[in-house]
Image (cartoon, rainbow, N blue to C red):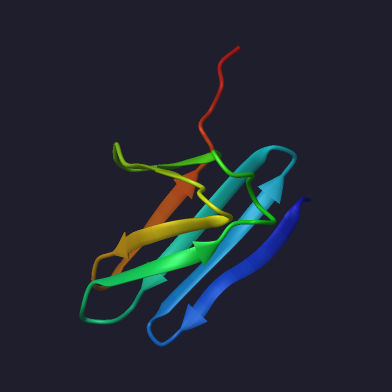
Amino acid sequence: RGSYEILHAEGDVFVHARKLGDEVVVCGFNVGTGTRRIDLSAGSLLPDGGILENAWGHEARKVERGAIRNLELPPRSGRIWLTPLHND
């Protein structure tokens, strides 16, 4: 269910997204030995002003001009960002 999109696949870094309705999950992996910073096109995932939160921390990123900028992936790690959960 939903859509799957590869957002970045270059060198030691791979990032993909899943979207179902308004919910978005972005998973990033860095298998390299150095920290990587990347910019991702978010035009098909979220509108400008959309927010992605780090699933395991307190970091949040806002979509600006169709992109999520300066995402950091530490060496030999993975990160998950997702749209905020709304408990209505």
Image coordinates of residue 5 in percent, x first then y, are: 66, 65
Image coordinates of residue 51 in percent, x first then y, are: 50, 39
Please, is residue 39 above or below residue 52 in the view? below
The mark tally for this picture is 0
Which residue is found at the position 28% from the left and 81% from the top?
32
> Looking at the image, which residue sits at the far top?
88
Image coordinates of residue 70 in percent, x first then y, are: 35, 61
Work out which quarter of the rendered image holds the C terminus and state it. Answer: top right
Which residue is found at the position 76% from the left and 51% from the top?
2
Which residue is found at the position 74% from the left and 57% from the top?
3
> Looking at the image, which residue sits at the far front?
65
Q: Is residue 82 left or right of residue 61?
A: right
Quarter of image, res 75: bottom left
Q: Closer to the camera, 85 or 7?
A: 7
Quarter of image, res 55: top left
> Looking at the image, which residue sits at the far right?
1
Please, is residue 58 above or below residue 14 in the view? above
Which residue is found at the position 64% from the left and 55% from the top?
18
Quarter of image, res 7: bottom right
Image coordinates of residue 17 in percent, x first then y, are: 59, 59
